[in-house]
Image: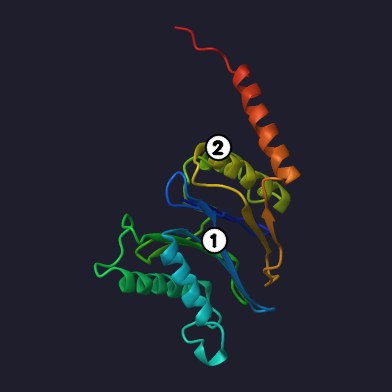
Amino acid sequence: MTYCIGMRLDRGLVFMADTRTSAGVDNFAVSKKMFTWHVPDERAITIMTAGNLATTQSLISLLEERSVSEQDRDPSILREPTMFQIARLVGATLREVIVNSSPTGQTSDDQFGASIILGGQIKGGKPTIFMIYPEGNFIEITEDTPFFQIGETKYGKPILVRAYDSQMEFEDAIKLLLVSFDSTVKSNLSVGLPFDLQVYENDSFATDRVKRINAEDEVYQTIATVWGDALRDAFQLLPSYKL
């Protein structure tokens, strides 16, 4: 299983992904699930993946291969004119991978299933995020839906719904995402540290604001501990329900 979040703020975009992969309760490994491409002063693109590891690795390899040399960039995420067209390309590439893996094509619940969060900005357009479904179709982020989750989403969603504010600073957004991830880690063994984090500021066209958050990270440990204590304290303040 996996947990990834892509969130849009007034200042830009924030992405976070765990790195745990599992093939049973006694077989865990670490695998990168966040990938970036950029052309200075022109475009910045981030992709996060969830689902069958062979499918997602093949998808990323194809996208990488088709963006290496100038003559091979057709189609390529480094040539498409808009983020919408990139979403179409990624969806089509995902379907291509599945067709080559499964003669029956892809469905959301089969063994080759994969979901994608795609975000970024191309010069002349706004920063945006898409969620690409296993079948290759997709939706775009809106004011009513300001963040997307893929993978194990249910444990970390309540805090996002309650605390998200589009005007928050990046530092507060990261704190919010860490609480969401910590709640998920404590509820599902198939999601785990380290976490990959990226912050994208509007019109920067750069993908260099990244960090890998390990279990030893002092800020993460403090957030996890204080949040747990605060929940217990808040529970004690609630009125008892008497029959």
Q: Callout 2: 10 Å neighbours few (<14), some, many (20+)?
A: few
Q: What residue type is labelled 1?
A: Lys
Circle 2 sits on which residue?
186
Label annotation for residue 233: none
Circle 1 sits on which residue?
33
Disc 2 secondary structure class: helix
- Residue drawn at (73%, 38%), measured in percent from left and top? 222
Q: What residue type is labelled 2?
A: Lys
Position of residue 124 in the picture relative to residue 60 (left or right): right
In the orientation shown, which residue stands out farthest toward the front? Answer: 26
Above or below residue 76? Residue 119 is above
In the orientation shown, which residue stands out farthest toward the left? Answer: 104
How far from the left and from the top, in percent, is residue 55? 41, 66
Residue 42, image quadrant: bottom right
Q: Can residue 87 be seen in this view?
A: no
- Residue drawn at (60%, 66%), measured in percent from left and top? 127
How far from the left and from the top, in percent, is residue 34? 57, 62
